[in-house]
Amino acid sequence: MANQKSNNPFMTSGGSGTQPETYKILRPFEEFILKPRGWRIKNIHGNALTGTLPDRLIHHADYGFKFVEYKVRHGNTVSMSKNQKRDWVVGGDLFNGLNFWVIAAEDLRGPQNSSLREILYNKLFQPYNSQWLVNSSLHRKLF
């Protein structure tokens, strides 16, 4: 039954589509929030050339460009890959001053999470929150 399709509309077989970050956070946020509001989305993560850049570059005619990193929250923490820690954390600062927005939640699927999706969407219009990833004392401020 390894080839059986999932009933989860946000989970795809193969590749990174089976990662919790993708089907719990990224796809619901983009499908329910960004696309209906006119945002264009470019995947910039997942190959040797992009390395540890944030997951997406998004653009809106009225709001411009924004880099977005999606993370699954576990309590008040999220995990970073070894390469993200290496490239983003240099003396406590983000790599080369790269700033971006972090969208982090335990799960954004389903209608019960529509208000949480709205709260996270509004964070895109606040100052960058990427410094949160390198400073654990800021973890509660992200949420």
Image: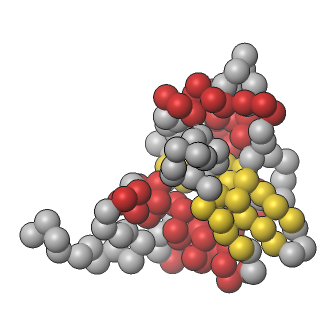
| Residue that lies at the very extreme toward the left in this rendered image | 1
Quadrant into which the N terminus falls: bottom left
Residue under the point 35% across and 70% down: 12
* Nearer to the camera, 66 or 24: 66
Residue under the point 65% across and 74% down: 33
As displayed, is residue 131 above or below residue 45?
above
Horizontal side, residue 78 vs residue 103: left or right: left
As displayed, is residue 9 above or below residue 86?
below
| Residue that lies at the very extreme toward the front in this rendered image | 49
Horizontal side, residue 105 vs residue 98: left or right: left
Q: How many marks?
A: 0
| Residue that lies at the very extreme toward the top in this rendered image | 91
- Residue 56: x and y in percent read 64, 58
Residue under the point 39% across and 77% down: 9
Q: Quadrant of residue 51?
A: top right
Q: Quadrant of residue 14?
A: bottom left
Horizontal side, residue 70 vs residue 35: left or right: left
| Residue 138, visible in the rendered structure | no
Horizontal side, residue 136 vs residue 7: left or right: right
As displayed, is residue 52 above or below residue 116?
above
| Residue 11, visible in the rendered structure | yes
Image color mode: secondary structure
As displayed, is residue 81 above or below residue 70?
above
- Residue 28: x and y in percent read 53, 70
* Nearer to the camera, 80 or 142: 80
* Nearer to the camera, 57 or 136: 57
Residue under the point 64% across and 44% down: 53
- Residue 114: x and y in percent read 59, 73
